[in-house]
Amino acid sequence: MQRPEELNWFKVDTFYVANCIIHEQKNEFFYSRNGVWNKTYTVIPETSVGGNMSKHLQTYYKGYRFKNAIKETRADKKDIVMVEIYEKNNYKQKLVTTLFFDKTGKLINTVDPNYELDGQTKESAEDQSLEKYYEKMNMSNKAEGDNNIPKDVMNAFKAKYPHANGVKWTETETGDYSASYYGTRGKEICIINSYGVITETMTMGNPDNLLSSISAYIKQNHKSCKMVEYYAVKKLVEKKNFYKVIIADKKTKVEQELWFTTSGKIVE
């Protein structure tokens, strides 16, 4: 391995951090007090932001301009890539949108341009060194809590819904966590990913309030089924809203999910 250049040591919280340059890339290596490696932050070029990350940026942020990207390589293998961009309409004001992706390129979370760091707005935070990203990248790798629910997940839920009682936890097929409970608006469901980010919320609706276009679609295309329940769904990361309708065959009782836009159009 190439010898590190400009090596400096300092301390962040309980970690000892080695700041250096390797292969012309800025790195920071985090070690515990016992000398065990925990994570590494590496500044990466735009050319390294490829695959699903690039596809997401080009699809949802057309005309964007790249600012920075940092890869967090973690001991628990839950690697993260943080990408900062200027959206087309925000470039002149130098307002930065921040996106977090997992190691497969799946979007974890977004931080809007009004995000403040150390009391500074995006306009005044142009040339930030790696230590300025600690607040953004602070995603714990601890995974312990009640009913085998990771601590980050449990803390995120309790912070958002401190008065929720009778919560039922399940793990989804995608590895996220679902918290189901009854609130003031009836049955509600909160989906939280393994990083402790709330990605989706669902609120059960009154069947009498279901859009007529959705009812008509079900009657026409699923004549042997009846509606069991439906939810107003907010996809918080994608910033999109949908209706999820659960129908069941009248004879077999087999259930099926149908997704609709807020205007009542089926999502194929």
Image (cartoon, helix red, strand yellow):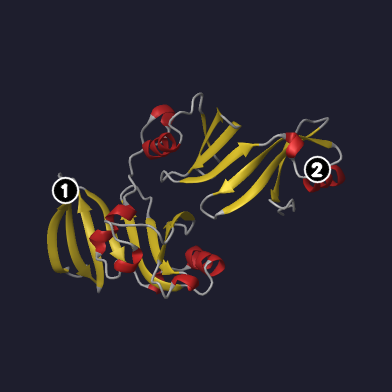
Front residue of 187/44: it is: 187
User: At 40% from the left edge and 70% from the top edge, which residue is drawn?
Assistant: 48
Quarter of the view holding residue 215? top right
Measured as percent of width and height from the top left, residue 169 is found at 51, 31
Compared with residue 72, is residue 218 higher up or lower down, i.e. above or below? above
- Secondary structure state at the residue bearing disc 1: loop
Compute the Cα span from label 1 to label 2. 62 Å
Front residue of 89 and 190: 89
Q: Any mark on residue 108, and which? A: none
Rendering coords of residue 176 (x, y %):
50, 42
Q: Residues within 10 Å of mark 1 (few under 14, many from 20)?
A: few
Query: Residue 156 in the image: x percent, y percent?
Result: 41, 39
Residue 60 vertical placement versus 200 (above, below): below
Is any part of residue 135 visible from this angle? yes
> Quadrant location of the C terminus?
bottom right
Q: In the displayed structure, does residue 265 sit left or right of residue 149?
A: right
Identity of the residue drawn at 67% across and 36% down: 205
Which sits in the foreground, 143 or 184?
184
Q: Earlier in the sequence, mark 1 or mark 2?
A: 1
User: Where in the figure is residue 83, as x and y percent of width and height?
Assistant: 40, 64
Q: Residue 215 carries which label?
A: 2
- Dot 2 amino acid type: Ser
Quadrant in the picture for residue 189: top right
Q: Give left or right: position of 232 versus 218.
A: left
Disc 1 and disc 2 in contact, CB within 8 angstroms: no
Describe the element under mark 2 as helix, strand or loop: helix
Residue beneath label 1, please? Answer: 35
